[in-house]
Image: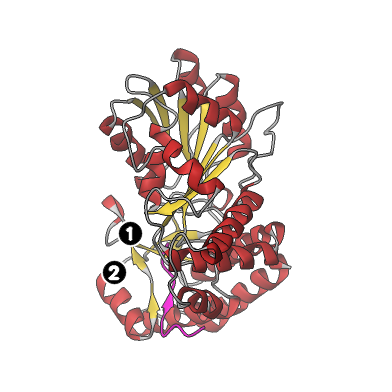
């Protein structure tokens, strides 16, 4: 990779040379047949990745825009949604729903833990909801949602399942054709962004609707959005030479290459690799006395929120790592200064993560701790190599 730094934050993530090369191709007209062919290929690859029988949308914007598209095209003002929140980004659905007049209830977990499915069941039993939102991997906590448990509970109560895959798509299983424990217990909407496990620069909002979600959109009639109304985008997704709003031509080039790499590796292999790298990073950092916020059974494959040992200064530690070319992220909300977040997804390699373990150990030693980074590397390599392949 031509990157000068190791960008191991929860997104954006490292970009490989072939994606940079695609991004740098000549900018063509957004109605050019050559561009349209690339866009079509990217859309078909997105459908293949998510295994949807409905529509996919790739538009200029962030994951937050994708969240908005998911809500306004399925839920009308005055209708109710239930937000399953396992951190900061689950909570974001609360204000988003309220901005469009949607009534919002929340089942919230303690940070670092999964939501109790019994509480979800109780909430659904007492109120009729149009949709339930799930954040697959919360970027603030590193907690993964248990879809095997949550999806069938939600579908038993007749609600749509809206899955926020921003920090999970292409690294953790998201299969819209899959039935979770019973007939038709499927994910209805998946939303994500380009810059995390897909490994493309930021700037694309990606949303997939199955036929059930599309039927819900049809019943709504007019929605409180224009750019975010999927009815304005469906003609473009069917024929990218048509015009609604100018697409980010070069980002679409890059996205198509990113999707090619995702599918070339194979989804099952990607899921296994990400799971192995996550376990290996957390186990190696535990050698340093650093504890992951999420228990291993609830930990996301894409990022980890790591609690500092007593006495380690957050700002000084991350600044020292940055001087060495390793960029990690601070923690959010009440964990600010008490933890850091490290990404291990997308185009991130085993060699990069191993180097990160060394640099973290060296930096701790420089700041007055005494840790054995050779042992931590051995732990990392043992798990990463054994479980990834």
In the picture of the structure, the residue carrying the numbered disc 1 is: 331
Residue drawn at point x = 63 percent, y = 40 percent: 176
Q: Which residues are drawn in magenta?
A: 1-11
Q: Label 1: few (<14), some or many (≥20) within 10 Å?
A: many
Q: Position of residue 272 (x, y in %)?
A: 67, 60
Q: Is residue 143 visible?
A: no
SS assignment at label 1 = loop
Say if residue 28 shows up in the picture. Answer: yes
Query: Residue 170, located in which quarter of the rendered image?
Result: bottom right
Residue at figure coordinates x 58%, y 49% from the top left: 297
Q: From the viewer's perspective, is the residue at label 1 or at label 2 nearer?
A: 1
**Dot 1 and dot 2 residues touching (CB under 8 Å):** yes
Position of residue 166 relative to residue 150, above or below, is: below
Vertical side of 22 occupied by 136: above or below: above
Query: How many numbered callouts?
Result: 2
Residue 330, horizontal then vertical, whole percent: 32, 64
For the stretch drawn in magenta, the main secondary structure is loop
**Position of residue 257 measured from the top left corner of the image (x, y, whole percent):** 57, 68
Q: Residue 341's spot in the image, x, y percent?
A: 40, 63
Which is more N-terminal, label 2 or label 1?
Answer: 2
The residue lying toward the viewer, choosing from 338 and 327, is: 327
Structural distance between the alpha carbons of marks 1 and 2: 9 Å
- Compare residues 312 and 10 and report the one nearer the observer: 10
Q: Residue at x 37, y 54 (%)?
A: 62
**Residue assigned mark 2:** 314
Q: Is 23 in the magenta?
A: no
Q: Quadrant of the C terminus?
A: bottom right
State left or right for residue 229 relative to residue 49.
left
Q: Residue at x 72, y 69 (%)?
A: 386
């Amino acid at each position: 990779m031509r990157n000068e730094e190791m960008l191991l934050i929860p997104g954006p993530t490292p970009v490989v040379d072939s994606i940079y090369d695609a991004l740098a191709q000549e900018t063509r007209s957004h109605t050019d047949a050559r561009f349209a062919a690339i866009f079509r290929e990217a859309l078909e690859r997105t459908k293949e990745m998510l295994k949807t029988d409905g529509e996919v949308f790739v538009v200029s914007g962030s994951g937050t825009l994708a969240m908005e598209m998911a809500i306004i095209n399925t839920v009308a003002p005055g209708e109710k949604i239930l937000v399953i929140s396992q951190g900061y980004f689950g909570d974001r659905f609360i204000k988003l729903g309220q901005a469009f007049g949607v009534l919002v209830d929340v089942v919230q977990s303690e940070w670092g833990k999964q939501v109790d499915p019994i509480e979800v069941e109780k909430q659904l039993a007492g109120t009729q909801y149009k949709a339930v939102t799930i954040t697959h991997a919360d970027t603030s906590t590193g907690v993964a949602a248990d879809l095997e448990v949550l999806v069938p509970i939600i579908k038993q109560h007749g609600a749509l399942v809206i899955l926020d895959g921003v920090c999970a798509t292409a690294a953790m299983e998201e299969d819209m054709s899959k039935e979770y424990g019973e007939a038709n217990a499927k994910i209805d909407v998946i939303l994500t962004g380009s810059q995390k496990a897909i490994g493309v620069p930021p700037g694309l909002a990606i949303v997939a609707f199955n036929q059930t979600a599309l039927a819900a959109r049809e019943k709504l009639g007019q929605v409180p959005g224009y750019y975010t109304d999927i009815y304005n985008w469906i003609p473009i997704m069917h024929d990218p030479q048509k015009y609604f709003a100018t697409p980010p031509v070069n980002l679409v080039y890059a996205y198509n290459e990113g999707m090619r790499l995702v599918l070339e590796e194979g989804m099952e292999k990607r899921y296994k690799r990400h799971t192995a790298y996550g376990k290996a990073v957390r186990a190696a950092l535990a050698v340093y006395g650093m504890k992951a916020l999420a228990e291993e059974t609830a930990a996301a494959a894409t990022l980890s929120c790591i609690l500092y040992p007593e006495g380690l200064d957050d700002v000084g530690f991350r600044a020292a790592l940055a001087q060495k070319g390793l960029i990690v992220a601070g923690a959010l909300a009440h964990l600010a200064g008490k933890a850091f977040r490290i990404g291990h997804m997308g185009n991130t390699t085993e060699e990069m993560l191993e180097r990160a373990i060394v640099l973290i150990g060296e930096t701790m030693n420089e700041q007055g701790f005494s840790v054995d980074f050779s042992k931590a590397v051995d732990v990392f390599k043992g798990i990463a190599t054994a479980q990834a392949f």
